[in-house]
Image: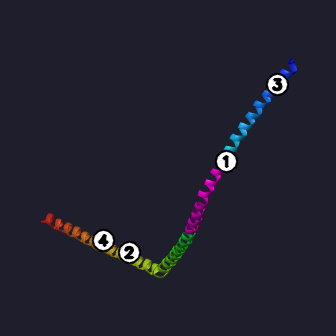
């Protein structure tokens, strides 16, 4: 006859066999996942290596263009410095005489306008005086 220990041993053996089968199933699935992961990494590597080459070429080209832009910027800075020096030279050589000429012409215009105003005032006073004399003569007669 079969004892309780034999039944427990048999149940335990069946349970252990099911556990081993489940573990084998998990290992097979894990192997497939790892194989797919390996293929994915190979695909990414195959695609990214040429891209990295293109990026390197692009960065090299951009660096060359930046060198050219740097040269252009240096030339523009040199030109602006030269223009500043030219402006200073112009202001030093012609600025002072131009200011003097402008001040002189302003003074001449002001003097001429004062003289003209003085002449007009003198004529008006003479006319007023003449009118008063004429009025006095007219009232005496």
Q: Residue at x 36, y 73 (%)?
A: 110
Q: Nearer the viewer, residue 52 or 112?
A: 52
Q: Which residue is under mark 4?
A: 117
**What's the CA distance linking mark 2 and mark 3?**
128 Å
Q: Which residue is under mark 1?
A: 35
Q: Nearer the viewer, residue 36 or 68?
A: 36
**What's the CA distance linking mark 1 and mark 2?**
97 Å
Viewer-side label of 1, 4? 1
Q: Are marks 1 and 4 in contact (CB under 8 Å)?
A: no
Residue 24 in which image quadrant: top right
**What's the CA distance linking mark 3 and mark 1?**
37 Å
Q: Earlier in the sequence, mark 1 or mark 2?
A: 1
Viewer-side label of 2, 3? 3
Q: Which residues are magenta?
A: 38-62
Q: Residue at x 18, y 66 (%)?
A: 136
Q: Residue at x 41, y 79 (%)?
A: 101
């Amino acid at each position: 006859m079969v004892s309780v220990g034999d039944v427990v041993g048999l149940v335990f053996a069946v349970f252990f066999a099911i556990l081993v089968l489940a573990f084998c199933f998990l290992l097979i699935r894990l192997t497939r996942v790892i194989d797919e992961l390996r293929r994915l990494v190979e695909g990414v590597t195959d695609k990214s290596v040429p891209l990295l080459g293109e990026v390197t070429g692009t960065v090299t080209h951009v660096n060359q263009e930046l060198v050219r832009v740097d040269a252009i910027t240096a030339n523009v800075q040199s030109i602006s410095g030269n223009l500043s020096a030219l402006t200073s030279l112009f202001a030093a050589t012609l600025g002072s005489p131009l200011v003097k000429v402008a001040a002189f012409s302003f003074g001449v215009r002001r003097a001429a306008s004062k003289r003209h105003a003085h002449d007009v005032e003198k004529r008006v006073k003479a006319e007023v005086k003449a009118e008063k004399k004429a009025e006095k003569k007219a009232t005496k007669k």
